[in-house]
Image (spheres, rainbow, N blue to C red):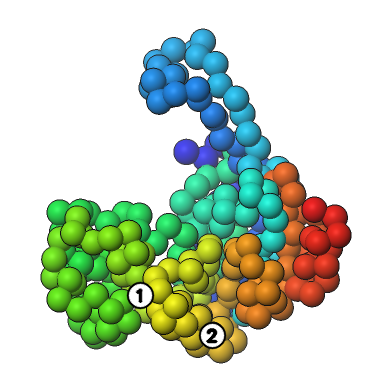
């Protein structure tokens, strides 16, 4: 739950020139020694744990239509920032403003019900997204074709490999025509042919100048291929914000 020190504003206003704004956003995680300690902490106040600051007074504003790469070492706070923007995590303090429909390709295989088929899971996700039956029926063939699952689309998710679930997740999320698209190391999904398709799909989305893209990758070459701006994170803070080539240069020289 967010505390009263944070202010969250999520709207469907895709015409707002500001797509995303974070102001002095901080997010901490408790690290317990074991799952047993985590459980005990729910009942007792004397359970010890370590605190890690994933984001620390993080500030940036992203305009409508920008493509922005978040660059930094593991643990720099990149994924946490994107989770906050997508609504999957809440900060302890700061202001979060997000305007427009967000499609977050973070953990592509998360949230599937293993007892339901691929189609049933897609229908459930579409209902959560507020997608009507007519629209779902229209985009379903596109999703199935892109995922390359064939007859497996009518089999329970428990029969899928992790790669198959990730392909289905990517196919669904990328078919939603979002106002804000969040990508976190998802372009390595599947084999080389599927990766090529995924890259082409992202390029297609980027061709819409009204779509805002937030991108996390460890491949600096890929970041420069897709993004015009780079934000370098270090220990939860934004330490550089500027043109992507300069961000990559700063990262290589200073981080």
The residue under the point 41% across, 82% down is 193
Splitting the image into 4 quarters, where does residue 211 fall? Answer: bottom right
Q: Secondary structure at mark 2?
A: helix
Q: Secondary structure at mark 1?
A: helix
How many numbered discs?
A: 2
Identify which residue, 216 or 161, lies in the foreground: 161
Residue 24 location, x and y as percent? 71, 47
Per the image, the residue denoted by label 2 is 203
Splitting the image into 4 quarters, where does residue 207 fall? Answer: bottom right
Asked if 172 appears above or below 109 in the picture, the reply is below
Horizontally, residue 18 falls left or right of residue 148, namely: right
Per the image, the residue denoted by label 1 is 171
Asked if 81 appears above or below 172 in the picture, the reply is above
Q: Residues within 10 Å of mark 1 (few under 14, many from 20)?
A: many
The residue under the point 52% across, 40% down is 2
Residue 179 location, x and y as percent? 50, 75
Residue 240 location, x and y as percent? 81, 60
Identify which residue, 29 or 149, lies in the foreground: 149
Q: Is residue 12 visible?
A: no
Mark 1–mark 2 Cα distance, whole angstroms, equals 14 Å
């Amino acid at each position: 739950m967010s505390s009263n020190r944070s202010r969250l504003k999520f709207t469907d206003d895709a015409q707002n020139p500001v797509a995303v704004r974070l102001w002095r956003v901080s997010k901490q995680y408790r690290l317990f020694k074991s799952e047993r300690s985590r459980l005990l902490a729910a009942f007792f106040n004397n359970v010890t744990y370590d605190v890690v600051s994933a984001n620390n007074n993080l500030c940036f504003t992203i305009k409508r239509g920008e493509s922005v790469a978040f660059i930094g070492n593991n643990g720099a706070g990149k994924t946490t920032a994107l989770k906050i923007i997508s609504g999957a995590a809440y900060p302890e303090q700061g202001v979060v403003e997000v305007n427009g429909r967000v499609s977050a390709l973070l953990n592509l295989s998360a949230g599937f019900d293993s007892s339901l088929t691929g189609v049933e899971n897609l229908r459930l996700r579409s209902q959560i997204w507020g997608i009507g039956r007519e629209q779902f029926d229209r985009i379903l063939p596109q999703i199935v074709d892109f995922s390359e699952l064939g007859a497996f689309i009518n089999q329970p998710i428990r029969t899928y490999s992790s790669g198959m679930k990730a392909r289905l997740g990517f196919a669904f999320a990328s078919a939603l025509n979002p106002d804000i698209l969040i990508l976190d190391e998802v372009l390595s999904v599947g084999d080389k042919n599927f990766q090529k398709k995924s890259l082409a799909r992202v390029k297609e989305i980027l061709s819409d100048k009204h779509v805002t893209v937030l991108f996390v990758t460890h491949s600096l070459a890929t970041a420069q291929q897709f993004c015009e701006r780079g934000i370098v994170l270090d220990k939860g803070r934004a330490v550089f914000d500027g043109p992507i080539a300069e961000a990559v240069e700063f990262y290589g020289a200073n981080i």
